[in-house]
């Protein structure tokens, strides 16, 4: 039974935009009628237009809709009795009102509401004198109700999705190090450089996707009164995500150096074996870092016990019997491996 309830709650959370729109629209209709509106459809219309994936987007669009509606209604009501409804009056009113709104710094969505309100008030006001008042009041009612639903009933929270994206990128980063180790053990194929460059681009796209998920998660928590735990987790993971960015930079630098060294024809079998072992150790270190972050997510970070020995990354390369060029490659790789070790062992 607890498992079924958990699945049900998860379903409600994932489909919150679907059922919130329906439920909030029904409540808004009845609230508008109770407030004395003769046009109660305007309240659920605001619900439908303002409901957005995040609370922050809903608040922003709701404010712009209310301000734009008030401005448009005031402009239209003040002149409708003098100009009536025709093509020229409509065009001139929208031009003048939106020019003023633009000068006052209104956003595009607010200017749309100004024009929309002018159109409908000019058309309906002479037929229904209460339309202007109903429009302002019902718009505010609809925006308030959708905001209440969005904040207090299964509020959107993209923290878990962002964390999962971070884990997925961590897996891909460690897999790239393992892949590099495997290629070194096979003797570095001739097309190593182009293959690594292609993989690097894919990994960069995944890194950007992860950063976007954290941005969405951050925006999803704005204006939330009851998401302290999620906000703490998101902040911790966002701070730690810098290590993945640095890990990507170290990986691309090391792969470039390995490709150049291999293409020079001076990389020995012993060198390939040594750096294959270090790349494999780097992959294990990153997987260990992921395990540590999973414990942090569960609130057990203080109990984390390292289970991987990556001390080989600290071992300096053998400088004896090396040419100046080979030493340059070896120490460039060593510098990246030292920084990688530091990045993924410090929190």
Image (tube, rainbow, N blue to C red):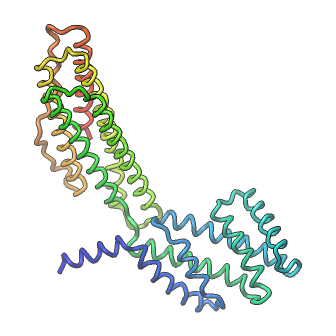
Confirm whether residue 277 shows in the render: no
User: The C terminus appears in which quarter of the rendering?
Assistant: top left
- The percent position of residue 47, horizontal first and vertical second, equals 54, 77
Q: Residue at x 80, y 69 (%)?
A: 91
Residue placed at 73% from the left, 58% from the top?
102
Please tell me in which quadrant of the rendered image residue 266 appears. Answer: top left
Question: What's the residue at 58%, 79% (across, down)?
Answer: 45
Residue 31 visible within the image: yes
Horizontal side, residue 56 vs residue 70: left or right = left
Residue 278 location (% of width, % of height): 16, 29
Q: Is residue 343 left or right of residue 77?
A: left
Q: Which x, y percent locates residue 239?
A: 35, 45
**Which quadrant of the view contains residue 270?**
top left
Residue 167: image location, x then y, percent: 26, 50
Residue beneath the point at 27% across and 50% down? 168
Depth order, front residue of 230/75: 75
Question: Looking at the image, how many numbered discs can be counted on the residues?
Answer: 0
Relative side of 90 to 66, left or right: right
In this view, which residue lies farthest toward the right? Answer: 82
Instruction: Point out the residue furthest to the front here.
Output: 190
Pick the quarter of the image with the N terminus.
bottom left
Which one is nearer the viewer's eye here, 116 or 228? 116
């Amino acid at each position: 039974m607890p498992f079924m309830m958990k699945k049900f709650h998860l379903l409600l959370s994932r489909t919150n935009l679907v059922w919130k729109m329906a439920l909030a629209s029904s409540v808004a209709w009845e609230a508008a009628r109770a407030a004395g509106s003769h046009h109660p459809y305007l309240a659920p219309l605001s619900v439908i237009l303002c409901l957005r994936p995040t609370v922050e987007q809903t608040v922003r669009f709701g404010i712009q809709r209310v301000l734009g509606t008030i401005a448009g209604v005031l402009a239209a009501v003040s002149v409708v009795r003098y100009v009536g409804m025709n093509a020229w009056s409509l065009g001139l009113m929208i031009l003048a009102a939106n020019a003023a709104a633009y000068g006052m710094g209104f956003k595009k969505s607010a200017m749309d509401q100004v024009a929309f309100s002018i159109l409908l008030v000019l058309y309906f006001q002479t037929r229904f004198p209460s339309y202007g008042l109903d429009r302002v009041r019902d718009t505010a009612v609809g925006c308030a109700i959708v905001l209440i639903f969005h904040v207090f009933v299964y509020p959107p929270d993209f923290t878990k999705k962002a964390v999962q994206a971070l884990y997925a990128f961590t897996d891909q980063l460690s897999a790239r190090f393992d892949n590099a180790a495997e290629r070194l053990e096979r003797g570095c194929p001739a097309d190593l450089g182009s293959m690594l460059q292609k993989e690097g681009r894919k990994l960069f796209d995944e890194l950007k996707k992860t950063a976007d998920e954290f941005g969405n998660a951050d925006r999803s928590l704005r204006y939330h009164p009851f998401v302290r735990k999620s906000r703490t987790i998101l902040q911790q993971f966002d701070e730690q995500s810098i290590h993945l960015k640095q890990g990507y930079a170290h990986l691309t630098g090391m792969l470039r150096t390995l490709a150049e060294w291999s293409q020079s024809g001076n990389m020995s079998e012993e060198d390939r074996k040594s750096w294959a072992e270090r790349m494999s150790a780097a992959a294990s270190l990153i997987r260990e870092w992921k395990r540590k972050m999973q414990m942090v997510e569960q609130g057990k970070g203080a109990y984390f016990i390292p289970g991987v020995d990556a001390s080989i990354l600290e071992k300096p390369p053998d400088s004896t019997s090396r040419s100046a060029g080979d030493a340059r490659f070896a120490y460039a790789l060593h510098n990246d491996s030292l920084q990688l070790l530091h990045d993924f062992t410090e929190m």
